[in-house]
Image (cartoon, helix red, strand yellow):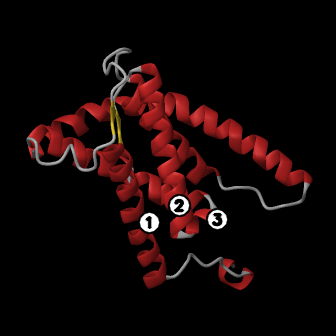
Amino acid sequence: MLKYIYSDLSRAVRYLPYGLALGVPVAVFIVWLINRQRRKKQKEPLSWVPVVIFGIYLAVLLMITFLSRESGSSKGVIDMDLFSTWGINDRNNAFVVENVLLFIPYGFLCSWNFKWAKKLWKCTLFGAVTSFGIEFLQLVTRRGFFQIDDILTNVLGTVIVWLVFRMIVLLFGPPQKKTEHEIR
């Protein structure tokens, strides 16, 4: 199973340049628009770094789950059987683990970017909606199978890293802004 995971992850890395090419300009444009509005309302601007990293991740996610597959590769299959993927063989077990790994950045980046995602149920719901959207697009375009297992494992990845992220914040505390005295 590990050889499949390693092979698939090394293939997924090839999408990083596309993620950078698509994610950076789109995220920069979105932050620019939002900050323009925030300046008009005299609010503090958004930080560029988390939004750009989230944009890169979403672009890579789109490439891996949707654009890297040929149209018609699934024949519109819907698999609503829970845990139907696990235990069949090492290849399918690797797919399950990879679906968890695929959404691990999602839980962290979602919490980092959105104040409302600091609550577990909101971050989980957003991960589930995003995963459902991916599965639905795969079904409609026939670029993958719509599997309930994929949604569950994606959500599991979101929840795992959200819990880890929150534990780190609880242990080390949120980053503190430096006072004027500390800056000098």
* Apparent side of residue 12 relative to residue 129 in the rendered image (left or right): left
Q: Which quadrant of the figure has residue 158?
A: bottom left
Observer-nearest of 39 and 165? 165
Residue located at (22% from left, 35% from top): 8
Q: Tag 3: residue type?
A: Lys
Residue located at (31% from left, 46% from top): 149
Asked if residue 164 is positioned above or below residue 53 in the image, the reply reads below
Q: Nearer the viewer, mark 3 or mark 2?
A: 2
Few, some or many residues within 10 Å of mark 1 (<14, 14–19, 20+): many
Asked if residue 57 is positioned above or below residue 110 in the image, the reply reads above
Q: CA distance from mark 3 to mark 1?
A: 13 Å
Q: Which mark is residue 115?
A: 3
Residue 168, image x and y in percent? 42, 76
Let me know if residue 6 appears in the view: yes
Q: Which residue is mark 1?
A: 162
Q: Which residue is mark 2?
A: 123
Q: Nearer the viewer, mark 2 or mark 1?
A: 2
Residue located at (9% from left, 45% from top): 1
Asked if residue 144 is positioned above or below residue 30 in the image, the reply reads above
Cβ–Cβ under 8 Å for marks 2 and 1: yes
Few, some or many residues within 10 Å of mark 2 (<14, 14–19, 20+): many
Residue located at (39% from left, 50% from top): 103
Let me know if residue 53 appears in the view: no
Residue 40, image x and y in percent? 91, 51
Residue 31, image x and y in percent? 70, 45
Q: Tag 2: residue type?
A: Cys
Q: Tag 1: residue type?
A: Trp
Q: Residue furthest front?
A: 81
Secondary structure type for disc 3:
helix
